[in-house]
């Protein structure tokens, strides 16, 4: 999640603050990969596998008890079958109750996050940097440490990568502050919102490659009407 706040130019002298973005005290070596590059993948497949595992834990116990009850009934153990059926019903009810509580917690969490996003008195953006992160990861794993120099000699590759960063949402304050007609004015490739003279994008990639905790800078964003607006922005970067 990104937060961008339009401020006057004289405030830029305060940026950055005392907080240190970098997790490294010294120079970065080719083998010194950020933690987020070493972490296990957390993409859709992993999320799907976790969901299936949770569902299995909720469903299999009552199904197993029901199966045992059927076996006991077939074997002539009426009392045992009745007990197992009762246990299966209890287990099934508990599984349903647990699933309902988890769904309720998820809804509450989503509602709170949406409220924070929409009601904050600052401009907030959601952007998909998956392609950029994968490109930086590939460079670092291949031994490239100086990300800035790498893209300085490959401007077309940098521009192509910039087109793959997608703005997926902005909050209402962004629309109000910039005078846009709606959120659609911002959604889509980030490239169309940045002027050709932009120097912040490559620095963002450098911060990715270093494993910084966050990235913040001045930026010049192109409005829907073609005019430019000066902004300060802060982005939290992946840690693990």
Image (spheres, grey):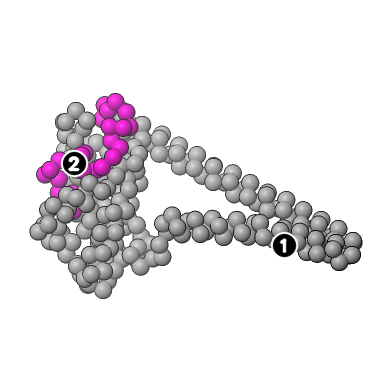
* Residue at image coords 68%, 53%: 95
* Residue 197 included in the magenta stretch of the image: yes
* Residue 172 picture location, percent across and down: 36, 31
Q: Nearer the viewer, residue 222 or 184?
A: 184
Q: Is residue 47 left or right of residue 38?
A: right
* Residue 138 included in the magenta stretch of the image: no
Could you say which quadrant of the image residue 185 lies in? top left
Q: Nearer the viewer, residue 47 or 202?
A: 47
Q: Residues within 10 Å of mark 1 (few under 14, many from 20)?
A: few
Q: Residues within 10 Å of mark 2 (few under 14, many from 20)?
A: some
Q: Secondary structure at mark 1?
A: helix
- Whether pointer 1 and pointer 2 mark residues with C-beta atoms closer than 8 Å, the reply is no
* Residue at image coords 17%, 53%: 158
Q: Is residue 193 left or right of residue 54?
A: left
* Residue 16 picture location, percent across and down: 23, 50
Residue at the outermost front position: 74
For the image shown, how many numbered marks are present on the structure?
Answer: 2
Q: Secondary structure at mark 2?
A: loop
* Residue at image coords 16%, 31%: 227
* Residue 129 picture location, percent across and down: 30, 51
Q: What residue is shown with label 2?
A: 194
Q: What's the magenta region?
A: 176-202
Q: Is residue 238 visible?
A: yes
Q: What residue is shown with label 1?
A: 64
């Amino acid at each position: 999640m990104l937060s961008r706040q339009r401020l006057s130019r004289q405030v830029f002298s305060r940026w950055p603050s005392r907080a240190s973005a970098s997790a490294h005290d010294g120079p970065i070596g080719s083998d010194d990969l950020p933690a987020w590059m070493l972490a296990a993948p957390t993409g859709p497949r992993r999320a799907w596998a976790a969901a299936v595992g949770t569902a299995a834990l909720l469903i299999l116990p009552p199904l197993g008890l029901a199966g045992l009850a059927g076996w006991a009934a077939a074997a002539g153990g009426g009392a045992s079958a009745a007990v197992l059926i009762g246990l299966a019903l209890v287990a099934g009810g508990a599984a349903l109750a647990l699933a309902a509580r988890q769904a309720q917690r998820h809804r509450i969490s989503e509602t709170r996050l949406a409220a924070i996003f929409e009601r904050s008195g600052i401009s907030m953006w959601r952007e998909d940097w998956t392609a950029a992160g994968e490109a930086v990861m590939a460079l670092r794993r291949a031994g490239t440490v100086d990300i800035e120099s790498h893209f300085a000699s490959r401007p077309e590759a940098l521009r192509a990568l910039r087109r793959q960063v997608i703005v997926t949402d902005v909050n209402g304050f962004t629309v109000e502050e910039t005078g846009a007609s709606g959120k659609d004015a911002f959604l889509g490739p980030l490239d169309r919102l940045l002027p050709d003279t932009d120097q912040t994008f490559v620095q963002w990639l450098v911060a990715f490659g270093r494993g910084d905790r966050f990235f913040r800078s001045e930026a010049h964003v192109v409005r829907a009407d073609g005019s430019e607006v000066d902004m300060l922005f802060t982005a939290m970067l992946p840690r693990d």
